[in-house]
Amino acid sequence: MQYRSFTKDNIQVSALGFGCMRFPILDNDSSKIDEEKAIEMLRYAIDNGVNYIDTAYPYHRGDSEYLVGKALKDGYREKIYLATKLPVWLTDSYEDFNKYLDEQLEKLDTRHIDFYLLHSLNKERWDKIKALDVLKFADEAKKSGKVKYIGFSFHDELEIFKEIIDSYDWDFCQIQLNYVDRNYQAGEEGLKYAYEKGISTVIMEPIKGGKLSNPSDEIKSIWDLNDIKRTPSEWALRWVLNHREVSVLLSGMTTLDQVKENIKTVSNALANSLNKKEIELIDKVTNIYKEKIKVACTGCEYCLPCQKNVSIPDIFELYNNLYVFGTEETSRNTYESYIRKGKDASMCVECGKCETICPQNIKIREHLKDAHKILTR
């Protein structure tokens, strides 16, 4: 495993972090984690050098933290650094900060959290929790020993990112970055800005919610031009880790094979290791994707449950796949099943609640209408 420095204390963390958001599930229900497989995957990763485990309060409809707590028994907690996140959108008072922290400590069955993040900050949430004195809470949480290091995860414009970075002596931050989303939200500029401030950065969505793992034949033909043959996922991970400013790359792995592949990839995906030809190939692929993607949804499920049972991320995946991967027949057949189950876009009443919590700031209602037109036969 490759290790990189993290925080001003230069903690050595694995360049690959295990994101506990996409565990294998049962009955196609994200709240029903396949515990046996998930624990096997986590422990295999730890046994093979992964020491950064990342979860959050809402992952798997609130069950991810419980699963991680179970997986870290039998001495595994002592082998890793544990990260989880404060659900700031649920807080309405200073007391709520401590309430959720204590609940998470109990769910994770641990006395302290190594890396605690203010989850999914945007301007509205930042202004709200700042007024509730969240920075005082951050100081007190560290002083109490319940939290070792404080950071935040981010989903908004670059200007807001810089404002938050400059507002406190953060230990680290977490941003979205992949070769398609280079200038999206904080982007590469935000990554470098944090680095120059001495703030370590964790990267989420390096494979864009898995969407860069299944390319079209057109994109495969570009990858095949390289002398060294790599999987699409490997290309995505190597592009992120080619940045010396990146400390940890999070991968939300769903199978043990994915864990094994990513461990192998990250072991030698060093900073500045891509050559000129490889960078040019990645740039070509980036341009193709950007021309075809309709909705920048990563399948994070923050928009669920929808009060009208609309399968928002699934619909957008079918919609994007149709354009990016040419899956017209499959996408439309699957969408017919959504219509039969009353989960299609026509059920949307345009309440807009999903848009207020979408970390990608997607105009969900507008895109649902467009998707329905295209996916309906």
Image (spheres, grey):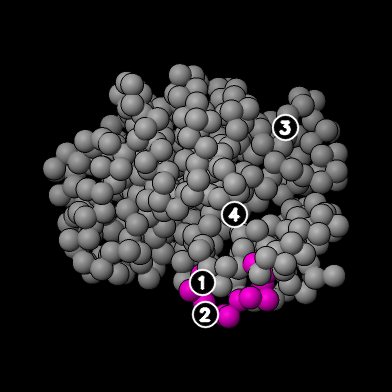
Closer mark to the observer between disc 4 and disc 2: 2
Looking at this view, is 90 or 180 the one in front? Answer: 90
Q: Is residue 189 visible?
A: no
> Which numbered disc flags the more N-terminal residue, 1 or 3?
3
Distance, label 2 to label 1, CA atoms, is: 9 Å
Amino acid on which the number 3 mark rests in the picture = Thr
Residue at disc 4, secondary structure: loop
Residue type highlighted by circle 1: Gln
Which residue bears the numbered disc 1?
Answer: 307
- Residue 5: x and y in percent read 39, 30
Front residue (pair 244, 208)? 208
Proximity of marks 2 and 1: CB atoms separated by less than 8 Å: yes
Residue drawn at 85 percent across, 39 percent down: 221
Residue 110 within the magenta-colored segment of the rendering: no
Describe the element under mark 3 as helix, strand or loop.
Answer: loop
Quote the CA–CA distance across marks 2 and 3: 41 Å
Q: Which mark is residue 231?
A: 3
The type of residue carrying mark 4 is: Thr
Q: Which of the labelled discs sits on residue 298, or is there none? A: 4
First to last magenta residue range: 343-354
Q: Position of residue 47 (x, y in %)?
A: 45, 19
Mark number, residue 235: none
Residue 125 in the image: state x and y as whole percent: 36, 66
Q: Which mark is residue 351?
A: 2
Look at discs 3 and 4 and give the one toward the viewer: 4
Q: Position of residue 50 (x, y in %)?
A: 46, 26
